[in-house]
């Protein structure tokens, strides 16, 4: 039988029978449990938020946007799903006394409108614009667009609603046929949009574009750069919360440290006996370290188990909806919580490292004293 | 077997114990006597390598004590050959008497024949209390359990510090009888520090401290 295993088992169960050690051990266990639980839930929610916002961005923003009307060959570039052109500006639409600012878009290959058989140019409107103003297909409206070629700097364009399109975002949009947009809206500012198979590898595609078309250098921007500020803020927020919650782990570690000290103090007699009987300092140190680390380990396991249960309930029940928490502001659906192996590994590593040190250091300091002192110490 | 020369041990600030040179041979039964504070327990600690002398040398099994001090493995090994029964080496309160007795075997990773445990415990009359915890035992039973643990590995030397303190006459006689049995039959060298006249009379040699 192994001495360390034998005495760790004996000492661990005796902690909960000993009046002096029981309460501090329970406090340590509960504090590690709460710290791990909060850290896991908060970090998984932050991860979920990041993933949902990222998905939202990927479905709304172009993956790569290049200023200018450059014809790129998708076969020459890696990771490209589709390349199309986009025209974009802002204008206004008037309903009675109300004026609504709108986004005007024309995307090649995406919006097909039948302009040949109609008297007025056809447009498509976003479902948001339709809902807000109760517009119907066939309605004729006037839109006002910038026109820097005339002294009025503005011009009116009469159009007919030909389609309603479900569009992302919280801003009303009017879509034009790409070719007719040149005629109707004046000299356009055109961007080339690239849709990627894997948007996370956008740098690879951009560098190839620059390699083939050196004149486009610094004119391409990907979705990450477009939203860099948002991602940085989210990263900062996540980092601040992680630092703050790590203090909980540090506080738990101080209770583990104090437990180990109390246990050593109560077991000086045992240390003396074990040393006289021939146990090495190293094995005695292992006994005290492992016994106290086990308390933290059980707290960790409980924290992990409860956080996974809570995560399951949040994903599979309408708990958050029943609290009427409105997440529509962020434009995301469902409660943002995602299991992250990476965060779990970081949290586990951090908790284990801190609680192990809290269990190990008092034992190490005490047992680094001379054997003579350790054998006589309990008599003092 | 054990030889000490010019042995001195300083403790507190100005107190120094000076021991006369002595040789302990195999199968000796030596009583170390002297008044309180004369350094009996200190001498036992020095011989057991639980304490280091201020000056002088102690030789045990043909090697100087410094050899064991410099090597943790050798020091741990030495414990197998020396059984110690002293106030510094008590029963562990969380362990049953059986587990306490088997502790030296666990520490030295040795398997013990259960017959040996039964033989030793029954010869010390503690075979019925092996599953008890130390707190459930009388002082006499506890002393016998400690003796049982100190001889479980059949040590060549048994070092005992005040074994009969707090024991009544019957328990004292039983314990001393067992020391005699160990010395005569098992050829164990016994070094015992004592105030007790009964123990003193049973010893073959006396090392007197003034």
Image (cartoon, coloured by chain):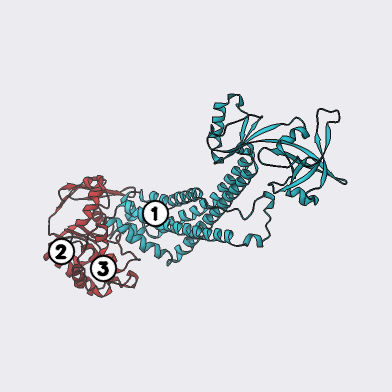
Q: CA distance from mark 2 to mark 3?
A: 22 Å
The local crowd at label 2, few if under 14, some if 14 to 19, many if 20 or more residues have their Cα within 10 Å, is many
**Chain coloured cyan here:** A
Indicate left or right for A71 with A377 as reference.
Answer: right
Mark 2 or mark 1, which is nearer to you? 1
Check disc 2 and report the residue beneath it: B203
In depth, the one of B164 and B18 nearer the eye is: B164
Residue B62, position as x, y percentages in the image: 15, 48
Check disc 1 and report the residue beneath it: A289
Q: Mark 2 touching mark 1, by CB under 8 A?
A: no
**Chain coloured red here:** B
Check disc 3 and report the residue beneath it: B145
Q: Is residue B145 above or below residue A315?
A: below
N-terminal-most mark, 2 or 3? 3
Residue A86: quadrant of the picture? top right
Q: Which chain does the residue under circle 1 lie in?
A: A
Q: Secondary structure at mark 1?
A: helix
Q: Secondary structure at mark 2?
A: loop
Mark 1 or mark 3, which is nearer to you? 1
Indicate left or right for A326 with A22 as reference.
Answer: right
């Amino acid at each position: 039988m192994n001495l360390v295993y034998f005495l760790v088992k004996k000492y661990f169960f005796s902690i909960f029978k000993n009046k002096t050690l029981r309460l501090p051990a329970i406090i340590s266990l509960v504090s590690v449990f709460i710290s791990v639980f909060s850290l896991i839930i908060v970090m998984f929610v932050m991860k979920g938020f990041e993933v949902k916002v990222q998905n939202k961005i990927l479905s709304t923003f172009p993956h790569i946007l290049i200023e200018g009307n450059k014809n790129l060959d998708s076969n020459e570039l890696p990771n490209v799903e589709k390349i199309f052109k986009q025209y974009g500006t802002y204008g206004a639409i008037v309903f009675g006394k109300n004026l609504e600012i709108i986004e005007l878009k024309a995307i090649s290959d995406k919006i097909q409108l039948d302009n040949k058989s109609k008297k007025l140019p056809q447009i498509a409107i976003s479902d948001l614009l339709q809902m807000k103003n109760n517009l119907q297909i066939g309605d004729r409206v006037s839109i006002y667009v910038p026109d820097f070629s005339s002294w009025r700097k503005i011009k009116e364009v009469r159009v007919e609603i030909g389609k309603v399109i479900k569009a992302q975002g919280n801003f009303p949009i009017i879509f034009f046929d790409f070719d007719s947009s040149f005629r109707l809206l004046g000299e356009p500012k055109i961007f080339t949009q690239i849709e990627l198979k894997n948007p996370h590898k956008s740098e690879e595609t951009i560098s190839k574009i620059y390699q083939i078309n050196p004149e486009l250098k610094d004119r391409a921007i990907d979705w990450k750069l477009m939203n860099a500020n948002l991602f940085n803020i989210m990263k900062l927020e996540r980092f601040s919360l992680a630092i703050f919650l790590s203090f909980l782990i540090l506080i738990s570690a101080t209770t583990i440290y104090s437990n180990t000290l109390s246990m050593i103090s109560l077991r000086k007699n045992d240390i003396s006996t074990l040393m006289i009987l021939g146990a090495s300092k190293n094995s005695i140190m292992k006994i005290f370290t492992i016994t106290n680390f086990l308390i933290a380990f059980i707290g960790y396991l409980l924290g992990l188990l409860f956080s996974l249960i809570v995560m399951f309930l949040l994903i599979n029940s309408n708990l958050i909806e029943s609290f009427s928490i409105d997440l529509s502001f962020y434009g995301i659906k469902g409660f943002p919580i995602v299991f992250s192996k990476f965060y779990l590994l970081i949290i586990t590593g951090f908790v284990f490292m801190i609680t192990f040190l809290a269990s190990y250091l008092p034992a190490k300091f005490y047992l680094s004293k001379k054997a003579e002192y350790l054998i006589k110490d309990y008599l003092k | 077997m054990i030889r000490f020369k010019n042995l001195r041990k300083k403790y507190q600030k100005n107190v120094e114990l000076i021991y006369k040179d002595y040789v302990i041979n195999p199968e000796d039964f030596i009583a170390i006597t002297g008044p309180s504070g004369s350094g009996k327990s200190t001498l036992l600690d020095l011989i057991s390598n639980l304490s280091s002398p201020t000056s002088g040398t102690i030789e045990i099994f043909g090697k100087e004590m410094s050899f064991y001090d410099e090597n943790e493995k050798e020091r741990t090994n030495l414990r197998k050959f020396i059984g110690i029964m002293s106030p510094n080496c008590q029963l562990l309160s969380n362990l049953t008497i059986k587990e306490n007795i088997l502790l030296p075997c666990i520490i030295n990773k040795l398997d013990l024949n259960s017959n040996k445990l039964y033989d030793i415990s029954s010869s010390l009359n503690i075979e019925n209390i092996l599953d008890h915890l130390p707190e459930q035992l009388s002082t006499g039973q506890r002393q016998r359990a400690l003796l049982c643990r100190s001889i479980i590995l059949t040590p060549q030397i048994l070092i005992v510090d005040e074994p009969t303190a707090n024991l009544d006459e019957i328990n004292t006689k039983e314990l001393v009888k067992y020391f005699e049995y160990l010395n005569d039959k098992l050829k164990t060298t016994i070094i015992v520090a004592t105030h007790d006249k009964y123990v003193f009379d049973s010893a073959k040699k006396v090392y007197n401290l003034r």
